[in-house]
Image (tube, rainbow, N blue to C red):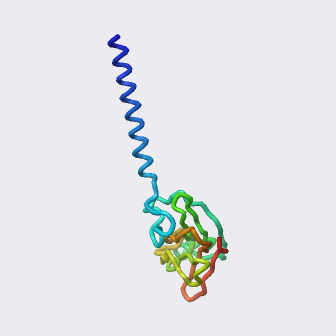
Amino acid sequence: MQFCSKVFQSRLYLATLCVLTSLTFVNKAEASCVGSECNDKDPIEQGCTDGRPVATEELGYYWSGIPLFRKQRKMKVTLMYSDKCRANWAKADVPKDTEIFVEELYAPGHIRGRYTTKANGQSYGNMSTGNVPNRACIKLKGRNRQCTLFK
């Protein structure tokens, strides 16, 4: 009988440990902001990593790499959306010193999440509320902005 009691206690201990561990992971997965609370905040730092692409525009090519080993890369911008955070942000594959941002439909020229890239390649900007239609944009030095459709 004592053996059965010890087995039960150890199983209860393991079950309790599993439940507590899973609760810890659930709390870490929660978003730190929702909707307009996410404006101009980093999607990774806020726990909005469930982002999915909503709209993408391919915008031509750019050269990347050191002169002897340069290669062409496809330049594109994508509007991302997080269901968990109900927010959008721009993700882009662009050359260094390109501005990445999100523009809101009902406030033309209202820019959120502006970020200037530090290197060639993949970068992302900060967020804008997903409660209104947005579009993701890039602006290369000395050029007009190029954007996705509003979604």
Report the side of 64 relative to 12 (left or right): right
At 54% from the left and 82% from the top, the residue drawn is 110
Quadrant assignment for the C terminus: bottom right
Viewer-proximal residue among 59 and 53: 53
Residue 84 drawn at (x, y percent) = 53, 57
Residue 10 drawn at (x, y percent) = 36, 24
Answer with the quarter of the image where residue 103 lies: bottom right
Viewer-proximal residue among 36 and 53: 36
Residue 19 drawn at (x, y percent) = 42, 37
Q: Is residue 81 shown to the viewer in this render?
A: yes
Q: Residue furthest top?
A: 1
Q: Is residue 92 above or below residue 139?
A: above
Q: Is residue 114 above or below residue 22?
A: below
Answer with the quarter of the image where residue 142 lies: bottom right
Quadrant assignment for the N terminus: top left
**How many numbered markers are drawn?**
0
At 37% from the left and 35% from the top, the residue drawn is 17
Q: Is residue 72 shown to the viewer in this render?
A: no
Viewer-proximal residue among 34 and 17: 34
Residue 65 drawn at (x, y percent) = 53, 72
Viewer-proximal residue among 62 and 111: 111
At 46% from the left and 58% from the top, the residue drawn is 31
Q: Residue furthest bottom?
A: 142
Q: Is residue 23 above or below residue 30?
A: above
At 60% from the left and 86% from the top, the residue drawn is 144
